[in-house]
Amino acid sequence: MNKIFLIMRREYLSRVMKKTFWIWTFILPFLITGSISGLVWMLKTNDSKIYIQVIDETNGIKQLENTETMFFEYGSNNLEEAKNNLTHAPYDAVLHLSSDLVDADAAKIYLNNSLGVFALESIKNQLGTVLEEYKLSKSKIDPQVYYSIWSKIKLEEISFSDEGEEVSKAVTDAFLGIAMALIMFLFVVLYSVQVMRGIIEEKASRIIEVIISSVKPFQFMSGKILGIALVGITQFALWTILMFIASAIFQTATINPAEMQEAQKVVAELNLAEFNLDFGHLAFLGCMFIFYFLGGYLLYSALFAAVGSMIETEAESQQFMLPVMLPLIISYLTMMSGFENPNSPIIKWMSIFPLTSPIVMMTRITQDVPIIELISSICLLVLAVLGTTWLAAKIFRVGILMYGKKVTYGEVWKWIKYR
Amino acid sequence: MAFLEAQNICKSYDGNWALKNLSLSIPENCIYGLLGPNGAGKTTFIRIINRIIVQDSGQLSINGQSLSSDQLGIIGYLPEERGLYKKSTISDQAIYFAQLKGVSKQDATKRLRHWFDKMEISSWWNKNAEELSKGMQQKVQFIISVLHQPTFLILDEPMSGLDPINANLIKDEIKSLKKEGTTIVLSTHDMESVEEICDNIALINKAEKILDGNVQEIRKSRSNQIFEITYVGNPANFTNYLGTGYEIVSEVQETDRNKTIVRALNDQGANEILKSLLPNVVIISVQEIIPSIKEIFISEVTPKSTNHE
């Protein structure tokens, strides 16, 4: 136990003491929040003006109105000439409204310069509104009446808790699930791969034999995995704190109070106010997160440790990494559908199967998971962690002493069978 | 009683023998040379002693106690595949390895200072391993293997790649460790060192032990009653007085003396030769020629069918 602690401490300190650790820990939150705010700022301050020539062949459709950045010019009816002149005309685009616009609900725009998604969307919206008004007046329908009839449904989902109470499913719950799954995915990928890297490095620098003449390979592997887990926890804790600080800084710098109010309205619509701040529920979520977090990391880092022991350079890792990464990638890809259809059979099975459960279960856990599924998922994960660690240790103790030999799956199978 | 006793150790990989019925005993407080060609099974045996791998069958005991992982603390090991953490200071990692062997941090630091002073490398204390040359790193690795004061030290090619001065430094340390009571296993291809410092040897070839025992006794037992006689005078005269029980192997004439190598056909010693020669020839020296460990190694390991000589 003492030896595992010594190894853990070294693995932890040697990483945390590195300059690169602190550089990344500090830079990343600012980089992420900074680039998001920068993007928002750039989109907002994109004040380049767009000039569009409109060839209107329709009969009596209201002209499009100029905005602060977009100017529509009517007059010409010659499409071919406009198209031909486009490259040296002062216009960014030619919008062609053909005579069958009303029936086809379609128009064409010929671009000189790329207009960007936002400008195109704005043209589409304005054209849609104009067309709608035209059709309404043709059908002699009062727009006021039309908009009072037009309906958009908000469907509130209510489920029943074990005690039979009605529980409103807040959207935020599901967002929380996605966020937890995402953090889980990032943590597992980032730090399990570090375990592999560390082992490759120790193997390449030929230090491993000195170590395992002092400690059992299993102790070494465990100490390493736990030490790197602590590095990850430290880094994530720091990132969380710094992310809050950084976003606070960038928010005050880029968002004005009016927009802040707007944002708050959106958040209110998301039912954030209704978020069920039930302490028991939160504690349960917290425990589950920690459990799957540890389980997932231990499972994958053992697998990556085994991969690391088999090879000598990272370049060789590809063929063995793919099968290990595959369940992770699949879980990542199904994350959204886990949130949308938490009870579909595939999501159910993936949240029970240990290689995918840590991530997929997180997307379901905020919603009601049948207790039997949860228990089987937990038990299977515990068994899988034990089994994988045992298997990885068997591969590990042979693999780390192998040099200059190209390892195949058949070879690895033999290692597992060695006594 | 032997310090380390190995009985019928077997280890195979995929049906290939790495060690086949290896039995040997290493006496306490000696330097024991483990010799053999590349791939003979020496490293496998050393790894089994270190519990890095487990034998398929056979017994291994230290001081009469069956070997277990608990005894790893008394073993010091310098593997052939050795390295250091590139980015850590050498003092930090030396202390770390000593701690893994069960030494407290304070003790390890104190002993390391002592060793650094002794090896005259105190200025390296805060250097990262990547700043040191391979030979310099090897010195540090040697210190790491002895820092926890093992009673049993296993050195796999400790002098390879070192310049003669540093090689001698390590040899001297090995000798003085023996004086302090350490039992040492030395695996090496440097046959001169074996003759110089080993008390006993075992020769392993193709997974099997083919020879073991005291170095001098092995050499003696291989001596073929060959003598080198240096004298002054006429070679023809020398041959006349040599007598019938001898055969001349070679003759070398120098300006003021002659050297003749003679093989005794019967079990006669140097005294018998001198009896007939002394009254008639001016003898400068007589020396029995004993085969070197290198010669024994080559003759034992070379396949007999191709050994025409």
Image (tube, coloured by chain):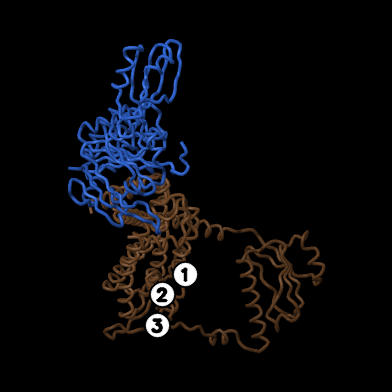
**Left or right: residue B4 compared with residue B228:** left
| Chain letter for the residue marked with disc 2 in the picture | A
Output the letter for the chain in brown: A
- Alpha-carbon distance for marks 2 and 3? 24 Å
| Chain letter for the residue marked with disc 3 in the picture | A
Q: Nearer the viewer, residue B229 or A405?
A: B229
Residue type at mark 2 is: Met
Q: Which residue does the numbered mark 1 point to in the structure image?
A: A330
Drawn colour of chain B? blue
The quarter of the picture where the N terminus of chain A appears is bottom left
Q: Nearer the viewer, residue B158 or A293?
A: B158
Q: What element carries label 3?
A: loop
Q: Which of marks 1 and 2 is nearer the N terminus?
A: 1
Quadrant of the rendered structure where residue A108 is? bottom right
Residue A266: image tag: none
Above-or-below relation of A108 to B163:
below
Q: Which of marks 3 and 1 is in front?
A: 1
Q: Is mark 2 on a helix, strand or loop?
A: helix
Q: Give the class, few, some or many, for how many residues have Cα within 10 Å of label 2's Cα (few <14, many ≥20).
A: many
Percent position of residue A177, x then y: 39, 71
Percent position of residue A167, x then y: 33, 81
Q: Give the class, few, some or many, for how many residues have Cα within 10 Å of label 3's Cα (few <14, many ≥20).
A: few
